[in-house]
Image (tube, rainbow, N blue to C red):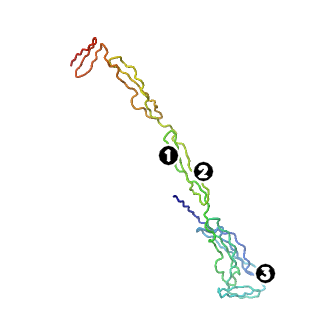
Amino acid sequence: MDFEHTSYICLSVAGNWGAWLPWSPCSETCGKGMQTRIRLCNNPPPSFDGPPCKGAETQTQVCTERNCPGKKLNIQYSPKTGLQKCQLTSRRSDKTIDCSDLWSSWVSWGPCSVSCGGGTRQRTRLCASPAPQHGGRQCEGNDIHIDFSNYPFTAPTVNGNWGPWSSWGSCSRTCNGGQMRRYRTCENPRPANGGRACAGADTEIQKCSTESCPVDGNWGLWQPWGECSASCGSGEQKRVRICNSPSPSNKGRPCPGDSTQLSKCNIRPCPGKIHVTETCHSIIRRTLYGQIFEHSYE
């Protein structure tokens, strides 16, 4: 059984600032105060070890409201937290104290940084309830809350794409026309998570070895024997055969062997003729009136 394993590689994403949020209310209801605004590193946020946004995330400016008839700080101390709260009143006071300021409420969550693959969302709050003043300390804690838990990983859809063609295979024949094939696979990448499969064929076929094959020659049947070359006294006759079953072609080999055969014929002696043969000594044969006379000599 085959198992397929799909791996996903996430590229690092550098953070980029979003637009500045509106200025916060002025820290003073009269006279000179301070107001701040922030921007979020969420366009997009850094992810997969990408570098964070560069520069300040907070801007502060002086704000001037109407002239104050006078101001006074009422101090409330919390035994539970050990913090002091500063609150302005309409009474005049020039006293400077050390105050710990309180956060505003969290703003609504921002959009997720990505549509799939696991992202982040952020929300912010301002140190403006009230803002630090008269030497008071900055709000304790973070002004940005980043949430990962509510956005589980969703694998992206991957459409399939063909890999390169393989080399052509060997031809199915050496002559008289064959076929050769090559292949490709849908793995560059493979379709995943509902992605589309590769379009088109995974196999190509083309003709090969189209030249004709060599044909070796083969003998046809022997033809009848020809007439004897002599009517008596040992003649010869021959017969032939033709290399045409089939004939050699396309550089095929010719027929092996001879195309002609010879045979003795009419070997009986002719009347009135002398035949000389060689044995251990010479013998002269004469035929006269049907009788044979032999004379031998060394």
Q: Residue furthest left?
A: 298
Cβ atoms at labels 2 and 3 below 8 Å apart: no
**Is residue 124 or residue 154 the one in the foreground?**
154
Q: Mark 1: which secondary structure?
A: loop
Read off the residue under disc 2. Answer: 200
- Residue at 51% x, 47% y is 169
Read off the residue under disc 1. Answer: 170
Read off the residue under disc 3. Answer: 66
Task: Identify whether 95 is placed above or below 200.
Answer: below
Q: Which three-letter amino acid code belongs to the residue tagged 1?
A: Ser
| Left or right of 158 on screen, residue 242 | left
Q: Mark 2: which secondary structure?
A: loop
The CA span between labels 2 and 3 is 75 Å
**Is residue 178 or residue 208 the one in the foreground?**
178
Q: Residue furthest front?
A: 290
Residue 177: x percent and y percent? 52, 40
Q: Which three-letter amino acid code belongs to the residue tagged 3?
A: Arg
Q: Mark 3: which secondary structure?
A: loop
The CA span between labels 1 and 3 is 93 Å
Q: Quadrant of the C terminus?
A: top left
Residue 276: x percent and y percent? 27, 18
- Residue at 49% x, 46% y is 170
- Residue at 31% x, 15% y is 270
